[in-house]
Amino acid sequence: MARQIDTYLEPLLDEERFAFYQAVCDFSDAEIAPRLLSWEREHQLTPDDVLRKMGELGLFGLTVREEFGGQGGTHLDLILMGLALGYHSQSVAITPGAASSLGTKPLQLFGRDEQKKAHLPDLAAGKRMFVFGLSEPGRGSDATNPEVVAVRKGDSWVIKGEKCWSTNARWASHVVVHALTDPNGRPGYRSTCFIVPMDAKGVHYQEMEGKQVWLQSSTGSIAFDEVEVPADAILGEENEGFKVMATTLNGGRLFIAGLSLASLAFMLDKCRTYVQERIQFDDKPIGRFQRVQDVLLDMDIALHQGVTWLLHLVKEYDAGTMRRESAAKVKIECSRRASELAILAMDICGGVSCLDEFGLIRHNRDLFVCRVGEGSNFALKSLSTRPLVPEIANILE
Ligand SMILES: Cc1cc2nc3c(=O)[nH]c(=O)nc-3n(C[C@H](O)[C@H](O)[C@H](O)COP(=O)(O)OP(=O)(O)OC[C@H]3O[C@@H](n4cnc5c(N)ncnc54)[C@H](O)[C@@H]3O)c2cc1C
């Protein structure tokens, strides 16, 4: 059965973009869907051969300019890749997704020419990855004041502390570390970002154990034990690290909204197929029950609305006109709605829903990350509400 989401995407895209999206769907149907279950059951991260093939398809360099070896595309291409790959597996999609939207992006936005020349070609080819080092064991939503500190030592800086929840850490060559550099600075201007090689002396990476979501994605904790880096490792301006992180997250949140819709698209197709085949009472399919139709229709409406809204915002983002709260709002709504519907999708399919091979339980689980990652939905509500109540914005909790 054709993907219902295509009905909504096709009219919004030019021919070339839709063909690109379909090519990634074909790749995902051929290379990911048939192998996913065994990766999950064997607790295996996305295998190297799949990473290599995604690199050969150019999926790590979609938004990188051609002069640096990339595809010269836009954020829209990245979102389309997320919709195409995330349909079967958010956790496979997030590998090139985070590599671009969180890894390469800060370098594209804030890197100096020599930093771009040194890293972008390899990142675009998928030969290396950067990790986005914002979250820490003691600093999640409250990310403006990191506990990781960097102290100046002559012409160098010495970094100490620990980052966690670092997506792609297993495959990363460098981590962009958000570190406190001026404890007495004004709020939002106390930290600096540093590009730190994962093989630098004093950097210790460990895969986080026991994670039950995004099973094929690497999630690491990275400790920095007096790691010395030169001053030219700074990304962006000194004491403007939070700006680097926050600006990067705007694009990342659009990607997470896309992953939520990719899950919703899969669930809708799975359910509409199943309810036409599953026979209960009087030799008739369960799709004839009106309550079952209600759920299908709610999924379809949410998908159509979400795709239309997201693509509109992505075009604004690419044009440089998107408001910051828009990315937060679309991420909140797409992940919330897809999560609510994921429970109902399982209900209308019954017991089979809890089997891993049926796929619904995977998306149900992975949607949790869409609600909490890149700013938890609850925390993002304050940011999104501020423009509505400007007179009291400074006291919002
Ligand atoms: C699989 C996975 C991958 C990730 N990848 C990365 C990555 O690559 N790089 C990175 O830096 N981070 C990453 N993260 C971390 C993610 O961004 C954080 O989990 C997120 O920012 C929330 O932080 P926290 O988990 O510490 O929750 P906390 O900040 O402890 O918040 C817990 C809960 O408290 C409530 N809350 C907190 N603050 C507020 C508020 N202001 N208003 C209302 N309610 C609030 C919310 O319900 C929130 O969910 C990843 C996380 C996961 C699970």
Image (tube, rainbow, N blue to C red):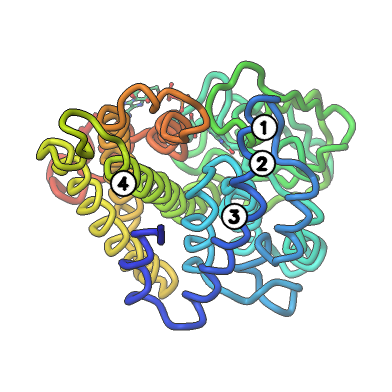
Quarter placement of the C terminus:
top left
> Which residue shows up at 74% across the image and 79% down it?
67
Disc 2: CA contacts within 10 A as few (<14), some (14-19) or many (>=20): few
- Where residue 94 appears, as percent x and y from the top left, is 57, 46
Please state which of residues 285 and 29 is positioned toward the viewer in this rendering. Answer: 285
| Residue bearing the label numbered 2 | 35
Confirm whether residue 181 shows in the render. no
Q: Amino acid at mark 4?
A: Cys
Q: Amino acid at mark 3?
A: Ser
Q: Is residue 58 above or below residue 147?
A: below
Q: Amino acid at mark 2?
A: Arg
Disc 4: CA contacts within 10 A as few (<14), some (14-19) or many (>=20): many
Q: Amino acid at mark 1?
A: Ser
Label 4 vs label 2: CA separation?
Answer: 27 Å
Do the CB atoms of the residues marked 4 and 1 lie less than 8 Å apart? no
| Residue bearing the label numbered 1 | 38
Q: Is residue 108 above or below residue 29?
A: below
| Residue bearing the label numbered 4 | 334
Q: Earlier in the sequence, mark 3 or mark 4?
A: 3
| Lateral position of residue 15 relative to residue 44, left or right | left
Q: Quadrant of residue 81?
A: bottom right
| Residue bearing the label numbered 3 | 28
Q: Earlier in the sequence, mark 4 or mark 1?
A: 1
